[in-house]
Image (cartoon, helix red, strand yellow):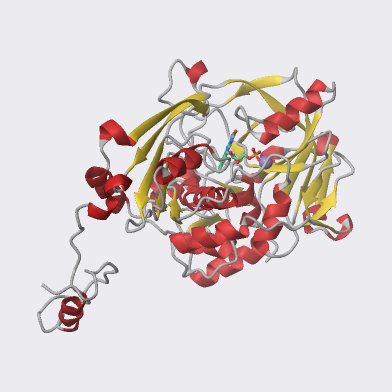
Amino acid sequence: MKSLGDWLAKVEDLGELARIEAEVDPNLEMSTITYLSGKQVGGPTLLFENIQGRAGFRVLFNPFGSSYRRLALTVREDPGTGPIDLARTLAHKMRARTQPVEVDPSIAPVNQNIEMGDDVDVTKFGAPVMWPRDGGAYIGTADVVLTMDPNSKRINLGTYRQMIEGPNQVGFYASPGKDALLDRELWWSQGKPAPVAAVYGCDPLLYLTAATTFPKDVSEYEFAGGIAGEPIEVFTSEITGLKLPANAEIIIEGFSYPDRTAQEGPFGEFQGYYGRPGGPTPFIEVTAIRYRNNPILMSALMADWPSNEAGAMWGLAKSAKVWSDLESMGVPGIRGVWSPPEAAGWGWTVVSIEQKYAGHAAQVGALAAQCMGGAYFTKYIVVVDEDVDPTSLAEVIWAMATRSRPKDSIDILRETWSTYLDPSQNPPENRPWGSKCIINACKEFKYIKDFARRTRLDRSVYEKVAARWQELGLRSEAPTVSLFEDEGFVR
Ligand SMILES: Cc1cc2nc3c(=O)[nH]c(=O)nc-3n(C[C@H](O)[C@H](O)[C@H](O)COP(=O)(O)O)c2cc1C
Ligand SMILES: [Mn+2]
């Protein structure tokens, strides 16, 4: 699997691709259809094949949406794999690294059409306007933005929103601490413009990797290759010197300058608000565009769950990255990590552990709160015992209600890494500084041996009842249960 086309063929086999052949307006109509269709959890990805005034161009909305089946396919796992197993497997895959492989640019499908100079026109692709108060059409949302560290030459892949500002100008908003912003500033500090490329449509694995926080000094190309189990095919651009993905749909390239800014935003964001008031922002002066024949622009609708493209993706990718970070630090007893998509994808982290020593739960909470994979934006970190399923909000809030002691179990971290997009912090200038709440919802370790017993079913009675389910006149099958009273306990 190398291209978006390969991926779509598999998604179509799964029955999760909806092709929309009727003519649709890119101005608010595509996003409204996506929002409404997305209300159904696990609903399809939408391929708009007939965009008003944009013959020859297609738009794919919400490649992941709220489907763990499509996410599984993307990380090369069986689509039937459940979310927590998927997070565990992905956590391991995230620790593999495979260098990209260079291919001849003349055979790269993305070079089927190359336009430069005055021929550049980014408005031709049918980029959508998503929300009524957005500042413009966003050509880049489910994208991969490539930048380079001028010293080490490391290529960074990050997902950054990109608003069309003119035929050869797209906005480049990056929030404090992000790698693309740090790369950009390094070039500028050396008195040079920053080379940048943006990929609008590709194997969704590249996008998932770009949207996840990996170490700053290693290219995400290596992690994407590690997850795919084969190297990503790239070629080196003669224009920017960046390594570009050969099998992409659309790539724009150009330069960003410290003294050239334009009004960017507002944009309806992942938390369900117009996050940051519009303001002067650097842009990319586009010098070249490349695209396949009949290319597909990939778009992400940012919205409240479940219509939000980022909810399930971060639910999975952030969980896997935090899990992987905790394991790399050698923290024992981790049973599961989950980032509930309902909490805007990034708002919460839940870690389930088997408590092994005094202070273990507090240690896990603090590390999950501040490790590279989990530090950005997240406000609530909840640590639960191994009998609590971190993917079940019902079980997590039950554990909070029955095992935490607010006067002892809550820690607050101050001045943590956040974003201009957090609407709760005012005035808006304060938004890059956040705070976090760590809730220890585990049984108090000091008294764990004597902690009140959970009520659990007797296994033999459960099995007897399950076998009699129809005879009892109850519908379908008895629910499955995994926790039972101790074997050998006699009433
Ligand atoms: C659809 C989507 C849009 C995003 N837009 C932005 C953005 O405009 N600015 C930003 O700083 N982060 C944005 N992010 C988050 C970053 O992609 C994410 O923090 C990523 O880890 C950054 O990687 P990097 O630091 O390696 O560049 C977006 C994520 C998604 C999924
Ligand atoms: Mn990075």
Q: Nearer the viewer, residue 26 or 148?
A: 148
Rendering coords of residue 272 (x, y %):
42, 36
Picture residue at 27% right of the left edge, 41% below the top: 404
Q: How many marks?
A: 0
Picture residue at 49% right of the left edge, 54% below the top: 332
Picture residue at 21% right of the left edge, 69% below the top: 485
Picture residue at 50% right of the left edge, 70% below the top: 14
Rendering coords of residue 375 (x, y %):
52, 36
- Mark yes or no: residue 27 visible: yes
Left or right, 29 with respect to 154, comes to left
Question: Where 262 falls versus 161 (above or below)?
Answer: above
Q: Nearer the viewer, residue 372 or 404?
A: 404
Q: Nearer the viewer, residue 446 or 388?
A: 446
Please tell me in which quadrant of the rendered image residue 300 appears. Answer: top right
Question: Where 92 falls versus 152 (above or below)?
Answer: below
Ligand 2 quadrant in view? top right
- Mark yes or no: residue 170 visible: no
Rendering coords of residue 388 (x, y %):
32, 56
Left or right, 101 with respect to 346, comes to right
